[in-house]
Image (cartoon, rainbow, N blue to C red):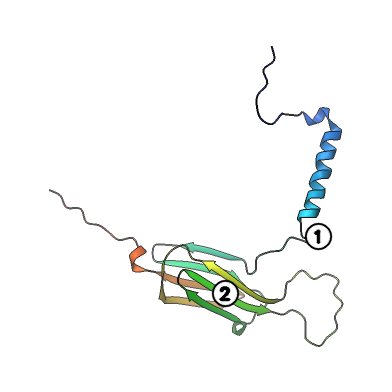
């Protein structure tokens, strides 16, 4: 008596080379249709960021290569940090024929939901070597505090 398990059948692809080839072709077609187009990478979120925290503050680092510091705006509203700026790679008025253009240009806006409540009075931002580092102090009510234990 043969017992069949419910679920997805297991196919030994070595015995079915045409099934394997068909699966690869379907994957390739799906990636072409679902992707950003032939020969292009999918759209990325700009700028890439890292968010971390310790018991006293939230730390955000954003990579902003090729952007002047005066072209960056930063605002804090509640638990949201809004980062705006612009990056232009080509010179205005020049006619340039690109062979490859992978660096995006234009105006960007990134809304970052902070992981905890913060104190808007405790914000520091430093832009150095294309990295924007933002330190935001946590609100006092979310900081860990020591609780004394009474012994009876």
| Cα–Cα span, label 1 and label 2 | 29 Å
Q: Position of residue 126 (x, y in %)?
A: 52, 77
114 is higher (above) or lower (below) than 18: below
Outermost residue on the left side: it is 152
Residue that badge 1 annotates:
37
Q: Quadrant of the N terminus?
A: top right
| Circles 1, 2 touching at the beta carbon (< 8 Å) | no
Around disc 2, counting alpha carbons within 10 Å, would you say few (fewer than 14), some (14 to 19), or many (20 or more)?
some
Looking at the image, how many numbered discs can be counted on the residues? 2
Q: Is residue 130 left or right of residue 55?
A: right
Dot 2: what SS? strand
Q: Image point 16% across, 52% down: which residue?
A: 150
Q: Is residue 61 left or right of residue 42?
A: left
Q: Image point 81% across, 42% down: which residue?
A: 24
Q: Position of residue 119 (x, y in %)?
A: 40, 72
Residue that badge 2 annotates:
83
Give residue 130's quadrant in the image. bottom right
Q: Is residue 26 left or right of residue 77?
A: right
Give residue 2's quadrant in the image. top right
Dot 1: what SS? loop
Q: Position of residue 75 (x, y in %)?
A: 51, 77
Q: Position of residue 7 (x, y in %)?
A: 66, 30
Q: Image point 46% across, 68% down: which residue?
A: 79
Which of 42 and 103 lies nearest the eye of the viewer?
42
25 is higher (above) or lower (below) than 107: above
């Amino acid at each position: 008596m043969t017992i069949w398990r419910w679920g997805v059948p297991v196919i030994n692809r070595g015995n079915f080379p045409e099934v394997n080839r068909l699966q690869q072709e379907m994957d390739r077609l799906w990636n072409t249709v679902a992707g950003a187009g032939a020969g292009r990478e999918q759209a990325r979120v700009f700028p890439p960021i890292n968010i971390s925290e310790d018991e006293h503050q939230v730390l955000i680092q954003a990579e902003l290569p090729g952007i002047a510091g005066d072209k960056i705006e930063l605002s804090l509203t509640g638990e949201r940090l809004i980062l705006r700026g612009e990056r232009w790679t080509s010179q205005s008025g020049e006619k340039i024929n690109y062979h490859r253009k992978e660096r995006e240009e234009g105006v960007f806006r990134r809304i970052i939901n902070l992981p905890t409540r913060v104190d808007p009075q405790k914000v520091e931002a430093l832009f150095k070597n294309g990295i924007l580092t933002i330190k935001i102090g946590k609100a006092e009510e979310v900081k860990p505090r020591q609780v004394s234990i009474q012994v009876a």
